[in-house]
Image (cartoon, rainbow, N blue to C red):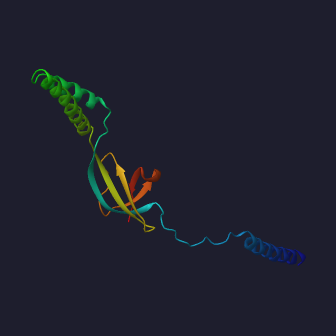
Amino acid sequence: MQIFLVRLLMTIAGAAAFTCGSNAQSPPPPATTTSACESCGVVRSVNSFQERGQASGLGVVAGGVLGGVLGHQIGSGRGNTVATVAGVGLGAVAGNQVEKNVNTKTKWAVSIHMDNGALRTLNYSNPPTVAAGDRVKLIDGGRRLALVAP
């Protein structure tokens, strides 16, 4: 009988210790707050545009030399000098414009309506893989876009 009572007391004590211990060690329930993705949004538009190139000065020099040579072929005396100077000036302006046109690049502007309500427009030198209506996430501060499941 003593063995039975000892076992009964040990079982009750063990159950009480398990119950008290489990309440003390159980973690609090996780918070159920849903936070919006701060770097996510919906593409509103994708537009291409031409960005005019920068002139390095090479076009001015080459155009001026070519214009001066061509201007020198016209007339004689003072007329020749005036034609040479005009040829240099016009050639320099033309050479500068030609250099800018040669260096023109196509870029793409992607407008995104962010989840926080802001509108961001990002410019890319390569054609983007997204289209209007796509849900995207900005990666590396907007240097890359990733499609996000709706």
The answer to which of 96 and 129 lies nearer the viewer is: 96
Q: Residue at x 40, y 50 (%)?
A: 144
Looking at the image, residue 112 lies above or below residue 87 = below
Q: Residue furthest front?
A: 78
- Which of 28/75 is in front? 75
How many numbered marks does the figure carry?
0
Residue 127: where, in percent of width, then height?
Answer: 29, 48
State the residue lying farthest toward the left: 75
- Report the residue at 18% width, 31% height from top: 86
Image x and y of residue 43, in percent: 34, 61
Query: Can you give x and y, in whole percent of width and height, for residue 91 in the image?
Result: 20, 31
The residue that appears at 52% across and 68% down in the rendered structure is: 35
Residue 78 in the image: above or below residue 136: above
Q: Is residue 37 left or right of residue 132?
A: right
- Nearer to us in this view, 21 or 80: 80
Q: What quarter of the picture does the N terminus occupy?
A: bottom right
Left/right of residue 33 with respect to residue 89 in the rendered view: right
The answer to whether residue 70 shows anywhere in this view is no
